[in-house]
Image (cartoon, helix red, strand yellow):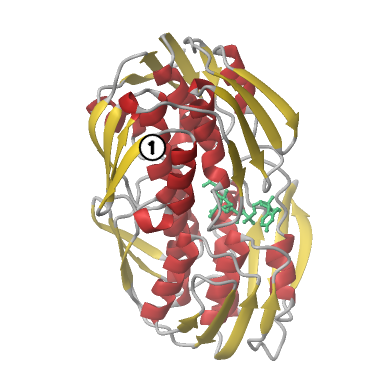
Amino acid sequence: MMNEVFEIEGGQKLGGEIEVRGSKNGALAILAATLLTSEPCVIKNVPLVSDVLAMLEILKGYGAEVEWLDERTVKIQAKDLKIEPSDLKLTRKIRASILVAGPVLARRGELKIGKPGGCQIGVRGLDAHFEGFGDLGVTAEKAEENSREVYYLTAPKNFQPATVVLKEFSVTATENLMTLLAGLEGRGEIHLAALEPHIQELGEFLKKMGAEVSGLGTHTLKIAGRKNLKGAEHTIWPDYIEAGTFFSLAASTKSNLKVKNVPVEYLEMVFRNLKKMGVSYRIGEQEAVISGADSNLSGAKIQTLPYPGFPTDLQAPFSVLGTQAQGTTLIFDTLFEGRFRYSEELNQMGANITICDPHRLLISGPTLLYGTNVKSADLRAGATLIIAALTASGKSTLSGAGEIDRGYERIEERLQKIGASIKRVVAE
Ligand code: EPU
């Protein structure tokens, strides 16, 4: 794989408008759900990020036909759904590959899948998925093939919906159980369901396919599924995590920025934390204007929680704000225990951050950041380092651009348009 790096010249004020693209995690769940029907589905506003492109390859691997109708509209039809992918390696690219399990089990009653890959951000087993499937009688067997872990999932003879109690508010496990129940004839429930915006979005999509879904936005979902779901059309909702990333970018670089296509209704806690940290902003209809130049940043406690709490995916981007704020910022990520690796990179840039334990980080601010060579450990860490490099004075080289491409579409081109000095180069 080509080693691409971003070269970033920091310290300049950004300005103008930037538009939020479709939700990565929404797209991943909905694309996988298209496997539930043999009819064509048309999905619009697909973000062109590598995780989503990898998902399309996985769908093809299970027999789906994938056709791009325009730049961001894709038609998917899984007439002949296979129970094992053409290449087990495909699923290693992204953790969300496990999302094909629900639809394939619903239609075929069995499935073979390679161990999913994804960001290295903590202990993330698949227990919530497998235990949830287990409540419906599905058995999971682990095996090794060509030194790779492979799972065989098998439904019971009399495969029927029932009540599933998840072990925690797991986002992708909720999605997998939703698609599975939507594709089985009869009524089932999911208790302790997660309720992130992309779960609500998936629920809306399943309704368009002909399932009855109630309780969206709560921890108890009731689903009346059908064997013959129809093809459906859907436009992916805007990405609330990308919106939040741009808010931190504007405030950290003390820039005034209009962020367009913002799902404001899903960002309550994010706005609340911006306010706590002294960021001036104005919320409009599907947009937000961040007045970084007029903000008086102060440290605060940021605690991540399952939705509607502050999203774990935004704690890293908000840490840069902490480095620019007066006083102490405590970041308490209650969910993941491996998501602070970016802090060493920020310290190399001049930040004053202490990892207290795997879940808590203390930032003393304000500190001047200066450009240097850094590497992104995962997707959100990568976005964080871009924000830091644009906040810093001098030049930074950020390696691991591919990590950022997993979730932010052509980020350098979009940042250039708001005045950022950032370019992608192939490292020697
Ligand atoms: N967790 C708890 N308590 C809970 C719920 C979860 O401690 O009540 C812990 C889990 O033990 C786990 C972590 O939180 O360590 C995440 O759990 P979850 O199963 O919800 O994560 P996921 O479904 O694997 C999705 C997103 C992630 C996002 C998490 C949390 C997709 C494809 N992935 O992952 O997205 O961080 O939910 O919101 O939807 C990203 O976009 O960068 C990303 C990693």
Residue located 50% across and 24% down the image: 325
Closest to the observer, 425 or 152: 425
Q: At 73% from the left edge and 46% from the top edge, which residue is drawn?
A: 123
Q: Residue furthest top?
A: 394
Looking at the rendering, which quadrant does residue 69 occupy? Answer: bottom left
Disc 1: residue Cβ within 8 A of ligand 1's nearest atom? no
> Which amino acid does the dot numbered 1 rest on?
Phe
Residue 63 screen position, x and y as percent: 47, 66
Position of residue 121 relative to residue 252, above or below, is: below
Number of numbered tags placed on the structure image: 1
Residue sitting nearer the eye, 44 or 220: 220
Q: Is residue 260 left or right of residue 263?
A: left
**10 Å crowding of disc 1: few (<14), some (14-19), many (20+):** many
Residue 150: percent from left, percent from top: 71, 57
Above/below status of 315 relative to 130:
above
- Residue 211 in which image quadrant: bottom left
Please indicate, yes or no, whether residue 193 appears anywhere in the rendered image: yes
Q: In this orientation, which residue lies closer to the viewer: 345 or 1?
A: 345
Q: Is residue 154 visible?
A: no
Q: Mark 1 points at which residue?
A: 247
- Identify whether 252 is placed above or below 98: above
Left or right, 366 with reference to 282:
right
SS under mark 1:
helix
Q: What residue sits 32% from the left and 50% below the top?
A: 262
- Residue 232: x and y in percent read 33, 75
Picture coordinates of residue 133, whole percent (x, y): 69, 73
